[in-house]
Image (cartoon, rainbow, N blue to C red):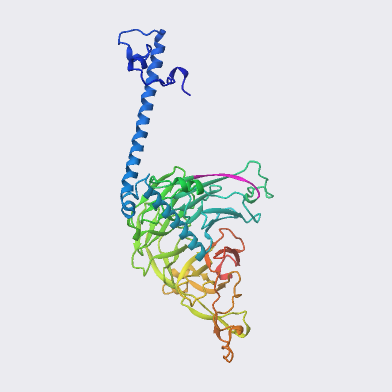
Amino acid sequence: MIPETMQLRKPVQSSNLGLNEMLNSDSIFLKSAGEPTTSGNGSTALSTVAENIIRLWNAKENASDILHQLRTRALLAAEGWLPSPVASAVFGMIPGTVSAAKADEAKFKDAEGKRNMLAMSEGPIGCIAWHPHRSLIAIAHRATDTVFIYDMASDTWCCNVLQNTYMQGITCMAWQPNCGYTLAVGCTTGVCLWNIIPSANAQPSAEPLSAPSLGTMQFSSWMTLMAFPPLRDQHRHPARLSSTERTVFCPTSTSVSSLAFSPSGQWLVTGHQSHGHLTVWDVSLGTATPLKRSGSTSSSATLQVGISPDGRYLVSTHANGHLRLWETESWSSRVWSDLPAAGSQFAWSPDSRSLFFAVAGASAIYALALFKPAPSLDAEITIASSFEPHATATLDSEEGSERIRVGGAVKSLAMDPKGQRLVVGFDDDSASSDISLLAVYLVSTEALFRAGSSNCALMPLGYVRGPNWGKQRPRGPEGPADLAEGQEKPSKKKRVRLGLPVPSWIGFAPNFGPGALLTVAWANGKVSFVPMLFRASPRDN
């Protein structure tokens, strides 16, 4: 509030008054330096000085607005005289022009189209994150950029949904360890850090030492955007904002491709889609430190980052085929550049001494073994197993008449927290493999450290079937109804293709006492939980 003595006078209505008539006798502009003021203690003079200062400030602001309007009109006029292709090329990056608005609209529609196509091909579920200490899973919806939370303890969906204008193009998620309900969501604008606070009137849990369940109550949440470097000013199209209330962000160095928390939850590592540098965040202070080792171009973009269970090592894979191993004490690194392709997925063993990973387009599973304790980078990469495509008979078919073809290029890997089971998903690289099956391996990491025994580290156990497995009819003229008159019946030993749904994400629950709990998101939007029961020691399985 401005005091009444400092408020501006009303403007003079008549335009025929001169300057001397516009300024009355109380104005300081008509007084000489030595003339005393009419008010005691100079109060009238001070109020008049403040009044004129405010008037000059408003004049400056009005002048800035007038200059901005003139600039915008000049740009629009110049843009109108040019042909559309030339205007788009010249004014497409200048905020406030029609070409910039059209460019943003095109980028928005292109991003929406890509998300919808990806949702149709790989399913609506983008990624899943298990809470490290609670029976909670966060599920990211690919098409709407929304995060849903499911409480396994109460078998209910949480009432609240996480959604924000800045959270667009979700690529990865992770819960912060040892920090209650804090979820980091990686997207094209940076890292959206969500803090979830249960309501004060929450019902107490049945167990005295356990926290209340999120699935049975309302909670409040707020989001902090962690962007490095700061976001550039982007043009906001008024017509579009009135209908969708969204802001279009161009892909910059803030686009996050992968993230991982340290075991203590103190720092967060992010990889980016536009360059190979990593960013180490101090979550409590909100500060970022770049690790510049792998190039600043999109050809070296970071694909995956992962921190060892003890927090002493960090591994990153890049689009140029490099795999880089970091030790987190002095942040020195070692790089392998002789891999046949870029590393796609990897999984750390619980003892932090070995790492299993796959490369794009290859059927082999690689293993990285660390021979000395941290911070040593003395490591070696070997091939642990190879899953070439092959045909096998189904157990529930009559007389073994149905045969399927499994294997091929490895797309995803997941190891259980006890280090006993490794689940492998395959890429749909051809029409000859049934990728709706997941292969399960028995893991023995000790074989990686024995001479000549690296190929014994993984032992095949079986497969995991998806929902509606085997209900699809054989394609082509193999069904009895499709046989033409006089055509011979096909042989009993035939191969069938199962078709959809295919797995889009696999992972394990962090805590499952009887063994391991596999979580699989399928392309039809369903999530399966597959318990694997075994003892702690692999010799007792």
Left or right of residue 402: residue 24: left
- Residue at horizontal 36 percent and vertical 37 percent from the top: 69
What is the residue that sits farthest to the front in this orientation? 16
Q: Residue furthest right?
A: 206
The x and y percentages for residue 229 are 38, 47
Using residue 238 as the reference point, say whether residue 162 is left or right of it: right
Number of on-image labels: 0
Vertical placement of residue 397 versus 145, above or below = below
Dominant secondary-structure state across the stretch colored magenta: strand
Q: Is residue 388 visible?
A: yes
- Nearest the eye: 147 or 341: 147
Above or below residue 510? Residue 47 is above
> Where does the image place residue 367, in percent across and percent down from the top left?
43, 68
Is 192 drawn above or below residue 419 in the view shown? above
Residue 65 horizontal/vertical position (percent): 37, 34
On whether residue 221 falls in the magenta region, the answer is yes
Q: Is residue 451 above or below residue 11?
A: below
- Residue at 68%, 50% (x, y): give it: 207
Q: Quadrant of the C terminus?
A: bottom right
Residue 453: quarter of image: bottom left
Q: Residue at x 46, y 47 (%)?
A: 239
Residue range in magenta is 216-223
Q: Is residue 349 visible?
A: no
> x, y percentage for residue 507?
53, 62
Magenta region includes residue 462: no
Looking at the image, which is closer to me, 179 or 41? 41
Question: Which one is in front, 221 or 81?
Answer: 81
